[in-house]
Image (tube, rainbow, N blue to C red):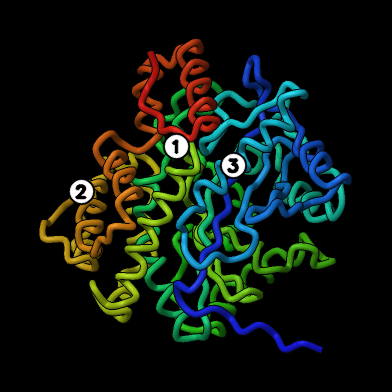
Amino acid sequence: MTDAVPPLPLFAGYGIEIEYIIVDRDQHNVLPLTDKVLHAAAGDYVEEVAVGRIAWSNELVLHVIELKTNGPVANLAGVAHDFQDETRRIDDILRPLNGMLMPTGMHPWMNPAMEMRLWPHGHNEIYAAFDRIFDCQGHGWSNLQSMHINLPFADDLEFAQLHGAIRCLLPILPALAASSPLMQWELTGFMDTRLEVYRNNARRIPSITGMVVPESAGTRREYEEQILAPMYADIAPHDPDGVLRFEWLNARGAIARFDRNTIEIRVLDTQECPAMDIAIANGVCAVLRALVAGAFRPLTEQNEVTTAAMAHIFNDCVHTADQAVIVDREYLRLFHFPERRAQAHELWQHLLESVAATDADAEWRQQLQFILQQGCLARRITRAVGKSARRSHVQEAYRVLCANLAQGSRFEGIG
């Protein structure tokens, strides 16, 4: 019998997950082929296959495939190249099936009522339970693609530090990462439509999502009592066999996974290529390290900002992303921001300038400066399709985005 592997301390490892849409190569409509991709790689209808440093896995629906680091990595150097290589491998499998990968947080014209197909293999009783309780034939379940960051903690003290820091930063994450301004051909008025539908997808049982911004918690016991226990109690009448009674039922924007001593950040839309996703991950982690190290306000003051106040800022960023106006002085003071108000991109500029840079940071900082100067991906897509969002313009924009993913390049517009 071997000894259990001790948990990693703060920032000693990073886990990244990125979800992509499978579409046909002609019209870019969704294609439910994830099971065929995994079968081609593994020789069977498996739910996960490891391909070197990256693993591929299924999700709730058959047109989404997830790529993830095959366990924690010591740092994020080279990770974007690893993900880029795997997108090309998957495209090679999909090409004979007339398929390809599409980036961004939502498919812009998918109709879930007509096109949603659940994963049918293996342990699909979990997906069946979600569908029975919440009805997954909606955008909030079947049309969501995101990048997750998993960060470790070793004990209760580190959990409190990491959770407090993530909770503070989470409200403004959509300002960097929003990439979903369209739904069923139309501009929705939200830069991050994915998060708008996501925060309402479990409204039948509100305790599952809460306000998306997690409540303050200083220990595992406190977290379990305040967040997990009410959620388990509320779903029990709908799930008598306890199929969903696990930590991953929690749908807040950052969730504690005590089964593996990590916190998973879930509010970042998928970008146009892995280089942009990993640039955002680097920026987020750099600011989180500074928060934990005490470069801004101490943990006690971080926890004094109410969840409701943070949720208000978060919702504003879901709506207008980088141009969201933040006037909450208590929140701005957490980051030593000198003015009484800030647009979200101005606060991000301040944060990145407050974090010491090294030569190794040059590439990801350059990508983030592009986002701060040109707008989040959702804003660039909105400019590209125009106010009328004519179908031909939408199709052309997403054709270019698919090419960006294939080439590993950033989206700078069309035409």
Disc 1 residue type (three-letter): Ser
Q: In the picture, which quadrant includes the N terminus?
A: bottom right
Question: Residue 104, percent across and down?
Answer: 51, 36
Q: CA distance from mark 1 to mark 3?
A: 22 Å
Residue at mark 1: 179
Residue at 27% x, 77% y: name it. Answer: 294
Q: Secondary structure at mark 3?
A: helix
Q: How many marks?
A: 3
Q: In this view, which residue lies farthest toward the left?
A: 339
Residue at mark 2: 346
Q: Is residue 195 above or below residue 33?
A: below
Residue at 37% x, 70% y: name it. Answer: 165
Q: Secondary structure at mark 2?
A: helix
Of the numbered discs in the image, which one, if any, rests on residue 85?
A: 3
Q: Residue 237, located in which quarter of the rendered image?
A: bottom right
Earlier-in-chain disc, 2 versus 1? 1
Q: Is residue 32 above or below residue 292?
A: above
